[in-house]
Image (tube, helix red, strand yellow):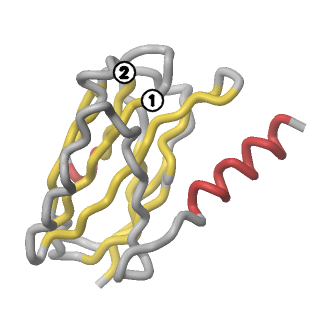
Amino acid sequence: MSRLLFAALFCLALSAPLGADEHQHVAQAPATAAAQPPAQPETGVRELAAVNIEFRGTKVWVPSTFIVRKGEKVRLTLINNAPSGVHGWACDELNIKVAVNNDEKDNKKVVEFTPTRTGLFRTYCHLHPAHIGGEILVID
């Protein structure tokens, strides 16, 4: 039953409203008392986001799969909402390895990358290898 509920939550996260680009997955950061107006996206930069959640002890970045284009500049915002502490997000092929705190004032990291080759690249928590990973599909 817990696998079914986890799968339903995962699908719900992936079905969030999409922006102008039909492949863009956007996760919203929790609202704060002093909310700032949204920053204007930089022209030519693909804005993506993933949120780390914990459900019955299972930690996962949602969404866990991204599709981007080779040569496309990507800005990925990682938000850690898991109550269990610091969690990592890494992709060896893109030379990314970052730790994200879960402190309410410091639970966000932004990474930028531009893929130079196509392929399916594994993403994972380099701090806790048993956590559920994901993937980045880079297409032409």
Q: Residue at x 39, y 71 (%)?
A: 24
Q: Amino acid at mark 1?
A: Asn
Q: Residue at x 41, y 32 (%)?
A: 125
Does residue 55 show up? yes
Does residue 97 show up? no
- Looking at the rendered structure, the secondary structure element under dot 2 is loop
Tell me if residue 35 comes above or below residue 103 in the rendering: below
| Left or right relative to 89: residue 57 | right
Image x and y of residue 98, in percent: 24, 32
Image x and y of residue 16, in percent: 54, 64
At label 2, counting other C-alpha atoms closer than 10 Å, the crowd grade (few under 14, some 14-19, many 20 or more) is some
Image x and y of residue 113, in percent: 16, 57
Of residue 124 and residue 58, the one placed in the foreground of this image is 58
At label 1, counting other C-alpha atoms closer than 10 Å, the crowd grade (few under 14, some 14-19, many 20 or more) is many
The reply to whether discs 1 and 2 touch (Cβ–Cβ < 8 Å) is: yes
- Looking at the rendered structure, the secondary structure element under dot 1 is loop
Quadrant in which the C terminus is drawn? bottom left
Check disc 2 and report the residue beneath it: 102
Q: Residue at x 43, y 38 (%)?
A: 124
| Left or right relative to 126: residue 76 | left
Check disc 1 and report the residue beneath it: 81
Of residue 63 and residue 31, the one placed in the foreground of this image is 31
Of residue 31 and residue 100, the one placed in the foreground of this image is 31
